Image (spheres, helix red, strand yellow):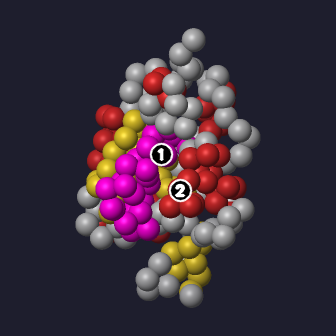
Amino acid sequence: MAATALAGCVSSTSSTQCLTGELADAAVFPSIVREGLDSAMRQAIGVAPEGFPFGAVLVDIVSGEVVAAAGNQMANGDPSAHAEVDVLREAGIAGIDLTATVLVTTAESCVMCAACAVWAGVQGVVYGTPVTFLTDSGWKQFGLTQPEIVSASWLSMPVVGNYLRELTDPLYASGPPR
């Protein structure tokens, strides 16, 4: 594998892996995925419910199409019903090959959701708002970043952060519902 310009990432003709706890650049993804990231993030924003405005979509790495979408459903009383867990669960049950997808989410995943993405074997994660902004805005989060969680696992995957943050930060700026 030849080294790329990305810190901690190495590329071959078939894949790019990020080996450290650092953020990657969207250039690690195939062009078909990169070209649709803006639209995918907007779709994730679109499925984010009021109150707990977290949304997530899965993008197929071959077609670049959004193949699944879900919003946070914690208001229904299920503490595990985060957008990322829900989209991965629903897509897996529907028979979608999770290892052929990129997870796009409105905010950096919590520990549970980041671990779920690792267990699912997604090809990478793209998030909007970072966990530091969430905590500064009053949202409860663990003090671990998604790249740190991924780097502590057996799976190397790129994590791209702060993507279209100007669209996602306003979802969280006023804090959680009281």
Q: Amino acid at mark 1?
A: Glu
Across the whole image, how many numbered discs are drawn on residues?
A: 2
Seen as rendered, the residue at the extreme top is 178
Residue depicted at x 57% and y 11%: 178
- Within the magenta stretch, is there residue 118? no
Q: Is residue 139 left or right of residue 68?
A: right
Q: Is residue 129 left or right of residue 146?
A: left
Q: Where is residue 81? Give x, y as percent.
A: 49, 36
Q: Which of the two residues, 121 or 163, is positioned nearer the viewer here?
A: 121
Residue depicted at x 72% and y 62%: 152
Alpha carbons under labels 1 and 2: distance apart? 8 Å
- Give the SS element for disc 1: helix
Q: Which residues are magenta?
A: 82-108
Residue 36 seen in this snapshot: no
Q: Where is residue 108? Give x, y as percent.
A: 56, 44
> In which image quadrant can residue 50 be found?
top left
- Give the SS element for disc 2: helix
Query: Of the numbered discs in the image, which one, if any, rests on residue 84?
Result: 1
User: Is 75 rendered above or below residue 2?
Assistant: above
Q: Which corner quadrant holds the N terminus?
A: bottom right
Query: Of the numbered discs in the image, which one, if any, rests on residue 117?
Result: 2
Q: Is residue 19 left or right of residue 60?
A: right
Residues at discs 1 and 2 in contact (Cβ within 8 Å) = yes
